[in-house]
Each structure stands twice: as C-alpha cells, then as structure tokens.
Image (spheres, helix red, strand yellow):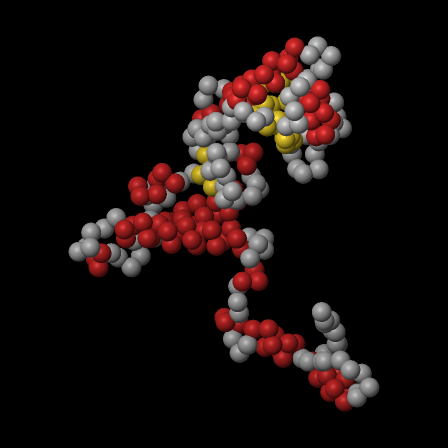
C-alpha cells in the first residue's frame, strides 16, 4: 500500500519530499514520516483505535486478562449489599480464588460447544454423553472418510458421518475417527458387527469405552501441560497471571 524510502539524513528526506512534490509528471503522494504517522494516529497516538489489533499475537490474551479482572470487580460489587456498595475500596484485593467466580475458574470455554461447553484445566473434565458415537482406530494410514463410510455401508449400517481425530496439528495423519450413527441402538449394532468382521482389522469401541481408555475411572489426573498454545488456553493463562501480578502489586 506504500513504501518507506530511507534517505541518508533528515535534510535529504526534506529535499526528497520537496522534489517529488514538484515533479508534476510523477503522480504519487509523498510525505514525511511525521506526516504519515499523523495521518494514521491523528494529533495524539493515544487516540488510535485498537480494533485493528484483534487476533494479533498477544493482544487477545491481554484483553482476556483485562476482561477477567473487570468481571471479578463486577462479581465483587454484586456480592455486596446495596447499603455497603459505596464503601467498596477503589482498588480492592482480588484473589484469584474469589468465591463468586470459583465455579467458573480453571475452565476453557468452548463458544460452539454443545455437549461439552468447557474443558477443565484443573480437576475432572466433563464427560460428554455420546451414545450414538462409535470410535474407530487402527485403520491403515491414508484411509479416507469415504472409505470408512463405504465399509459401514457394506455392513448394512447406512452412510454415517465420519470425523477424524488427530493427535497433532491439522496436517497430521488421523489417529482415529468418530463415526456418528443415527441412534444409540445403531451405534451398539455397529460395534457388534465391526467386531464380528474378522477381515476388517480395526479397533472399534463405544464412545464411553474410548473415554474410559483416555481418562480411566477418574479424569482428574489429566495434565494441562499438553494444552500449552492451544486456542484459548494461552489467553486464559494470561488472565490468570495478570490477576496474580495485580495481587502482588497490591
């Protein structure tokens, strides 16, 4: 959209602006860096809009911390009686374990989650109830979702939707697949038929069996270290650290 031209000195830059503006055949716009900066930010850079920073590295995380502190303040005010609200100090101590938000802490919320609305970063995870889902693994590398759908169809199970499960990154090969059957009964039948098919060397299980294989009888032992740099987790931890630093300053 433009170009910086670095001259050897301020005097040379001023001369360049003067000469380019005087050249009527060269239809370009030229300005000093000070003029360019003013065109972006006005007379004071403090008035610059931060809307363009949305989703920039670190900015969403910072705003998560700001909102988190603001919500703590609102919860604290809400917990006071109408008579004592005016007595609230200007800079109250806001411990991270504040009772009003305890039930919401250590959770990574999923905006589009249906049966799993959040991931527990501390304590047991929410165990989703998915009786109509079958988990399939140990299929050959390079298997396409259409291959799985056709195999299920050959067993008289229709053409169920297939969603691959990947352990790492978008480009990583799938480690398994969710096969969504129309009902819990159809899922139970699918597990039975796939296990009975000796020619198809795959591992199949109900969703509850798959969940148990990951978390055991209790998911409280699951570590949050693998969540580092996951969407939302870094932002959440920034909020936690921000509150902790405020506490230290107080």
Q: Position of residue 118 (x, y in %)?
A: 47, 37
**Looking at the image, can residue 66 be seen?**
yes
Which quadrant holds the N terminus? bottom right
Q: Position of residue 96 (x, y in %)?
A: 37, 44
Q: Is residue 92 left or right of residue 123?
A: left
Residue drawn at x 35%, y 39% as measured from the top left: 102
239 above or below 121? Answer: below
Label total for image: 0
The answer to which image quadrant residue 83 occupies is: bottom left
Q: Position of residue 30 (x, y in %)?
A: 71, 80
15 above or below 173? Answer: below
Q: Position of residue 6 (x, y in %)?
A: 74, 73
**Looking at the image, can residue 12 be seen?**
no
Residue drawn at x 76%, y 28% as measured from the top left: 142
3 above or below 250? Answer: below
Residue drawn at x 53%, y 67% as measured from the top left: 49
Q: Is residue 35 left or right of residue 201?
A: left
The answer to which image quadrant residue 91 occupies is: bottom left
Query: In the image shown, does 206 or 120 lie closer to the viewer?
Result: 206
Residue drawn at x 62%, y 26% as measured from the top left: 179
Tell which residue pokes out farthest to the right in this image: 25
Tell which residue pokes out farthest to the left in this image: 83
């Amino acid at each position: 959209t433009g170009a910086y031209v670095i001259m050897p000195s301020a005097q040379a830059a001023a001369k360049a602006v003067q000469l380019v503006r005087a050249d009527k055949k060269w239809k370009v716009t030229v300005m000093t860096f000070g003029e360019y900066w003013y065109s972006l930010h006005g007379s004071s850079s403090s008035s610059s809009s931060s809307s363009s920073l949305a989703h920039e590295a670190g900015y969403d995380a910072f705003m998560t911390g700001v909102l988190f502190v603001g919500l703590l303040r609102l919860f604290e005010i809400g917990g006071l009686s109408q008579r004592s609200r005016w007595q609230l100090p200007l800079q109250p101590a806001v411990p991270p374990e504040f009772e009003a938000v305890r039930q919401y802490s250590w959770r990574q919320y999923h905006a589009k989650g249906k049966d799993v609305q959040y991931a527990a970063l501390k304590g047991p995870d929410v165990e989703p109830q998915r009786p109509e889902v079958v988990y399939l693994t140990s299929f050959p590398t390079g298997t396409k979702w259409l291959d799985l759908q056709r195999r299920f169809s050959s067993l008289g199970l229709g053409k169920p939707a297939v969603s691959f499960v990947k352990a790492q990154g978008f480009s990583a090969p799938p480690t398994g697949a969710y096969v969504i059957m129309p009902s819990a009964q159809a899922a139970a039948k699918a597990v039975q038929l796939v296990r009975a098919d000796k020619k198809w060397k795959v591992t199949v299980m109900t969703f509850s069996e798959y969940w148990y294989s990951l978390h055991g009888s209790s998911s409280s032992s699951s570590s949050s270290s693998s969540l580092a740099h996951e969407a939302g987790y870094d932002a959440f931890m920034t909020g936690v650290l921000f509150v902790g630093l405020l506490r230290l300053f107080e």
